[in-house]
Amino acid sequence: MNVPLWDFYGSTMVTNNFIRLTSDRQSQQGSIWNSLPCFIRNWELHVHFKVHGSGKSLFGDGFAIWYTRDRMQPGPVFGSKDFFSGLAIFMDTYSNHNGPHQHTHPYISAMVSNGTVHYDHDQDGTLTQLNGCESSFRNKDVETFIAVRYHDNTLKVSTDIEGNGEWKECFTSTGVKLPTGYFFGISAATGELADNHDIISVKLYELEAPENQKDDPLDYSKILPSAQNTEPARDRVDDTKTSSFSGWKLLLLIILIIIGVGVCGMVGFVLYQNKQQHNRKRFY
């Protein structure tokens, strides 16, 4: 099936009711990309989505919403290319999280790149993220939405995942500069863990320009993406390898040690009794 003004690749499956970027199977990548560049400076994007699967404690990896210069290029970042130029909103569901952070998953984060920044998947992108928030949008019985608003160089991300029809702010970041003429897209990926990543609808709204932009002579199709107020940079910290004697294995080891000590004590006591009895016989 064809979708007017949209192209798709990979494992993407088009139905009458939704577009499934990946199914609940391992090692899949899929995406959809709009074929027309966006020349609107101030906009708001609404995505109606559903992430669901059979995994109860282990699932992943998630999907990403893109506004980038290049389109239809598969890669390791949620099914799309690394070193992208533009904006990415990551909907990370990987339950076995990585990196030097304390937040839980699912987690929503944003990243702005001029094409020279590497997204470190092993660290969940915490080294380069603009901002983020926790959001339990997976396996919901209600409709789930995300709104990405870009107005007057301010990026605001909100969600509606409780079924009450109200937007809840995830984060707001100022000082974000995005060029015009880039493309919108959505991609998803699964690895050893999997989920269904469904896109039900995508709606783009043009917002009224603020007064300070109406007489701005700058050609915004030629600027580089940038963000002033990023989170403080953090050094990469390799994941700590956990001991093989962890959890129930450690408990079992302790029990075996106690049993071993008890057996040794009993054997020692029996040997001591036998020795005492032998010594008594020598004096009769």
Image (cartoon, grey):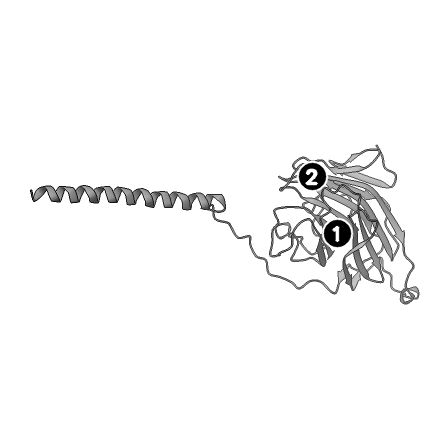
Q: Amino acid at mark 2?
A: Asp
* Residue 215, image quadrant: bottom right
Q: Are marks 2 and 1 in contact (CB under 8 Å)?
A: no
Percent position of residue 175, x then y: 78, 64
Q: Which badge, 2 or 1, is on the more N-terminal residue?
A: 1
> Alpha-carbon neighbours of circle 2 within 10 Å: few (<14), some, or many (≥20)?
many
Q: Residue at x 88, y 55 (%)?
A: 40
Q: What residue is disc 1 on? A: 89
Residue 141 visible in the displayed image = yes
Q: Is residue 106 left or right of residue 225?
A: left
What kind of element bears circle 2?
loop
Q: Residues within 10 Å of mark 1 (few under 14, many from 20)?
A: many
SS for dot 1: strand
Check disc 1 and give the amino acid type. Answer: Ile
Q: Which residue is mark 2?
A: 195
Q: Is residue 191 above or below residue 243?
A: above
Relative image position of residue 55 (x, y in whole percent):
65, 38
